[in-house]
Amino acid sequence: MTKNNISQKIIQKARDAGYVDCNLIDISTFDKFSEKVKDRIDIYPEAEEVYQDLLTRRDPKNWFSKAEAVVVCTWWYGQYRIPDKVDRYIGRNYLFDGRNNYSENYQARKELEKYMNKLGLEYRKGGVPDRWAAVRAGVGSFGKNNFIYTEHGSWVNVETWLIDTKAETVNRENNLPCPEGCRKCIDACPTGALEAKFRLNPRACIPYLTYDYQGLTPEKYRSSMGAWLYGCDVCQNVCPLNAGQWEEKKEYPYLQEIASKLSPASILEMEEDFFQEEIYSRFFYSKDIVRWKMNALRALANEGDYRYRPLFEKYQNSEHRRLRKMAVWGLQELAN
Ligand code: SF4
Ligand code: SF4
């Protein structure tokens, strides 16, 4: 099979499976990416461990020694209905996570992988900086908020595979999509994590604070984190390039059924068994129900709803220090 043939066949199959775009690129190293990561380590040395893992992605051969090309596809998740406005608590990317085995995205991935097997290709999923690969492949461009922008705005997931066969790249134009002078994402970032264009302080970013941070949420961020329980979409929601790009054409499986359980008050009343089965199984960056409840207390306090005062009083006596401390803080906020 010729290089051109391989590319055309994979691109066509990806589109048939439901990906909105796909292209193939060679496996030259991602040197500029690696330079940027090192710059970030100099600026944010306290976040070095977050970055070290990324550095291994500079060279695709580190991940798969037989790699000869990279397949880059984009999946549009802005096509799903958002039930009960639950996206004010949970980032949309996580609500419509393509890694859930009942999602269409997951089925599309399996279909494409089956096809690559049928073509006799050996492949490995991932192993490169996905967003940088997307830009090199021309399936998207960086916005100043570091998200990848496409004809569907930034509501896309980028997926990559390394394959063991050389393939032709169809070259495409790639320009900065942001209007001249726009800095709405930077100005809107609640915690100031997006400090300048393309520059994010990872330790101040709400997704990190909601599902990765170990311990009691630092007081300096609590008020500005608003009602987010898991992730944050503010810098994408305010972006003019995303205006009109969410279409709510379809139901995402099994989301409506649990949407009402994703409010802060429901999380605070949730039992561990239900949490593990219904919540952690979908939002798998945080299996710690105490962290979820701590986030829920902070979210309720920021929403300022006095009706929930008894919940704060209950958690003031919790066996968990994080919950006791957050409940005390929440009561003070409600009183102000
Ligand atoms: S995800 Fe939220 S906290 Fe992080 S940069 Fe964007 S707006 Fe700021
Ligand atoms: S808000 Fe403006 S600067 Fe930020 S990503 Fe969107 S268009 Fe670019």
Image (spheres, rainbow, N blue to C red):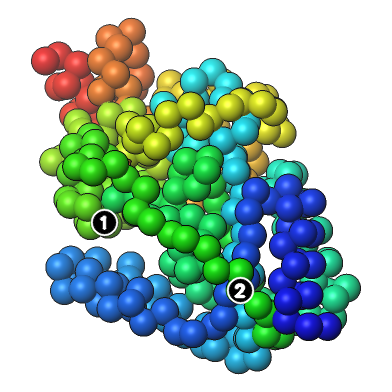
In the image as oriented, which residue stretches furthest toward the bottom? 65
What residue sits 61% from the left and 26% below the top?
Answer: 248
Q: Residue under label 1, please give it.
A: 198
Say above or below: 280 vs 69: above
Label 2: which secondary element: loop
The front one of 324 and 329 is: 329
Where in the figure is residue 49, as x and y percent of width and height? 31, 72
Packing grade of label 2 (10 A; few <14, some 14-19, many >=20) is: many
Left or right of 43 in this view: 270: right
Could you tell me the amino acid type at mark 1?
Phe
Give left or right: position of 110 versus 205. Answer: right
> Looking at the rendering, which quadrant does residue 233 occupy?
top left
Please report the residue visible at 15 percent of the width from the left and 68 percent of the height from the top. Answer: 43
State yes or no: discs 1 and 2 in contact (Cβ < 8 Å).
Answer: no
Can residue 209 be seen in this snapshot?
no
Q: Which mark is residue 169?
A: 2
Q: Quadrant of the C terminus?
A: top left
Res. 147 in view: yes
Residue 299 appears in which quarter of the rendering? top left
Query: 246 or 180, which is in the foreground?
Result: 180
Please name whichever residue, 155 or 9, is drawn nearer the observer in this view of the structure: 9
Q: CA distance from mark 1 to mark 2?
A: 27 Å
Direction from residue 159 to residue 45 in the image, left or right = left
Q: Residue at x 47, y 68 (%)?
A: 136
Q: Secondary structure at mark 1?
A: loop
